[in-house]
Image: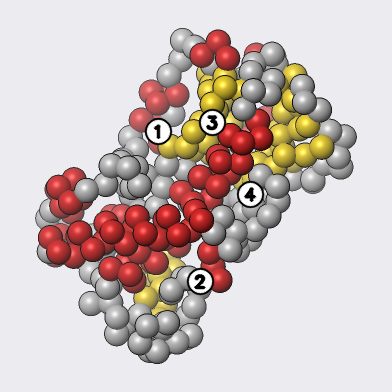
Amino acid sequence: MPELPEVETIVKGLRRELTGDVISQAVVLRDASIGHPSCRDFARFLPGHKIERVKRRGKYVLIELSDKASLVVHLKMSGRLLLKKQKSKPDRFLRVSLKLESGRELHFEDMRVFGRLWFFTSKQNPNELIKGLKTMGVEPLEDLNLEYLKAKLQKKTAPIKNVIMDQTIIAGVGNIYADESLFMAGIKPARKAGSLKDKEIKALIESIIKVLSTAIKAGGSSMKDYTDLDGVNGNYMSESWVYRRTNEKCRKCKSEIERIKIAGRSTHFCPSCQK
């Protein structure tokens, strides 16, 4: 699933390319890809709206439209947003196409069909109507601090990796960047969250911010489906510390990177560098 750096990369591309353009037609090819309203109303209400601003909240793409309407996108496991020239050959996984007055098309492709798009009028608040937005935690690059995270970790017996991936605590951090951040902070992913000392929590916050910022600069991570708006892969994996590096030598101490399962997820760490 695309995480914060991947979604931020897409948002930057959308903001650069689409701000000021107008949606002329909405074509829904798979009804279940629309979360709200009905597919018929989605296709009927979107045309004529100007794209005014594009933002990100956690792993959600938030597109503010004219008349105070909004379009929300969550890519889930395999969704992609791609900007195409009009009349270009559609991908077989194309689910929704937005035709633009500039002569281009914004395609939502989704092989595993978990992704969703929502359209809301000015009288509807996405933050109240989409559960994931309503319950979302702080943005790590803006609001994450020692006091907040210390309070969230207190008395928790769950593995620290699970806690920092909890979207109600920290928005946007998933499997890749949880592993990378814990490595940089020198903390084993299976350690009980409540056992972390202030110094370790502070180191973890600094690592999360550094890892996410580095990944954004690299355009995110591509392993299967993710690309940016132009179909270009992200480059972060070429410099990852532990993720997907099982049995390879640690870039710091030369020990072998190990992989375990935590809550059903592959988890990578260095047994020497992480305590």
Residue 197 at what x, y percent from top left? 12, 64
Tell me the CA gap for discs 2 and 4. 18 Å
Tell me the CA gap for discs 4 and 1. 23 Å
**Which residue is the site of mark 2?**
239
Tell me the CA gap for discs 4 and 3. 15 Å
Residues at discs 1 and 3 in contact (Cβ within 8 Å): no
Q: Residue 133: which numbered mark, if any?
A: 1
Under mark 4, the amino acid is: Asp
Q: Nearer the viewer, mark 4 or mark 1?
A: 4
Under mark 1, the amino acid is: Leu
**Which residue is the site of mark 3?**
54
Disc 2 element: helix
Q: Is residue 78 left or right of residue 272?
A: right
Residues at discs 2 and 3 in contact (Cβ within 8 Å): no
Q: Earlier in the sequence, mark 2 or mark 1?
A: 1
Q: Earlier in the sequence, mark 1 or mark 3?
A: 3
For label 1, the crowd category at 10 Å Cα-Cα, with few meaning under 14, some 14 to 19 and many 20 or more, is some
As drawn, 18 above or below 241: above
Q: Earlier in the sequence, mark 2 or mark 3?
A: 3
Tell me the CA gap for discs 2 and 1. 31 Å
Residue 101 at what x, y percent from top left? 77, 22
